[in-house]
Image (spheres, rainbow, N blue to C red):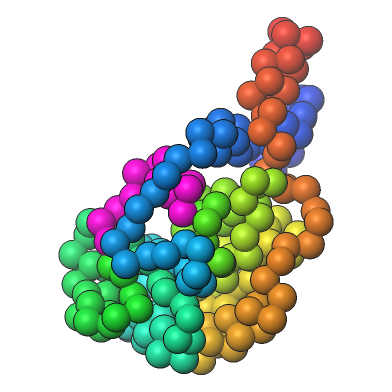
């Protein structure tokens, strides 16, 4: 568009990523990660990869992850390692020897969704996970290790909290969230799993 005006009809349908997630959740997959007992341990899924967090920010985040594991003996962190060595190597150096931090290879989509279902809460800089965690079959609190987010709807809905990359702030947020990890009963701002159907219906009605 040449200007900021949006013209024509606008229909709010939701995001089809929730449709895909809802289909995947129905499969009730088994997932085994070495050293993880889903029944007796509090498992935190932690992911980090964004370019803005490379370097000193990544070190700060990793130190925050380490402190979480040090301070919470009943908690285990699962960290799927990004394939980029710029991300992978600092995490391995700082966290690789910790007994309650599991550095694993990237999860396929089905296993990622199953891990989201089973984990206690999420630490991430991933935009996609911020959306997926809001789904009715997931509803996990997300602590966002970024200074900003392009998913403000999740923050406004109480699904996520932006804490930045300072490890003290990460720890403070985790302690607060641990006292009340449940998500308030709000609908996902990204849809109910029927976005594709709504899109098709609007196309039929208006084309």
Relative placement, left or right, of 39 versus 80 is right
Q: Nearer the viewer, residue 3 or 142?
A: 142
Which residue is located at x 66 percent, y 55 percent? 139
Q: Nearer the viewer, residue 55 or 120?
A: 120
The magenta-colored residue range is 104-115
Vertical order, 180 against 118 (above or below): below
User: What x and y, as percent, mark residue 99?
Assistant: 29, 81
Relative placement, left or right, of 8 versus 60 is right
Residue 197 quadrant:
top right
User: What x and y, as percent, mark residue 191?
Assistant: 70, 39
Q: Verify whether residue 66 appears in magenta.
A: no
User: What x and y, as percent, mark residue 146?
Assistant: 50, 72
One can see residue 122 in this view: no
Relative placement, left or right, of 157 versus 72 is right
Q: Residue furthest front?
A: 40
One can see residue 177 in this view: yes
Which residue is located at x 75 percent, y 59 percent? 157
Which residue is located at x 23 percent, y 77 percent? 96
């Amino acid at each position: 568009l040449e200007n900021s005006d949006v013209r024509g009809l606008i229909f709010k349908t939701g995001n089809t990523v929730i449709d895909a997630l809802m289909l995947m959740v129905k499969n009730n997959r088994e997932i085994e990660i070495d050293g993880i007992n889903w029944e007796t341990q509090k498992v935190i899924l932690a992911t980090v990869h964004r370019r803005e967090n490379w370097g000193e920010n990544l070190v700060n985040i990793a130190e925050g992850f380490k402190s979480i594991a040090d301070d919470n003996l009943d908690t285990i962190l699962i960290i799927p390692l990004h394939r980029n060595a710029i991300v992978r190597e600092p995490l391995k150096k700082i966290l690789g020897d910790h007994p309650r931090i599991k550095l694993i290879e990237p999860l396929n989509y089905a296993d990622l969704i199953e891990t989201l279902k089973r984990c206690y809460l999420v630490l991430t800089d991933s935009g996609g996970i911020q959306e997926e965690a809001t789904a009715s079959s997931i509803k996990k609190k997300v602590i966002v290790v970024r200074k900003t987010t392009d998913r403000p709807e999740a923050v406004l809905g109480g699904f996520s909290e932006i804490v930045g990359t300072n490890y003290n702030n990460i720890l403070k947020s985790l302690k607060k969230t641990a006292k009340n990890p449940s998500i308030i009963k709000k609908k996902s701002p990204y849809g109910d799993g029927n976005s594709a159907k709504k899109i098709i219906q609007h196309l039929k009605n208006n084309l």
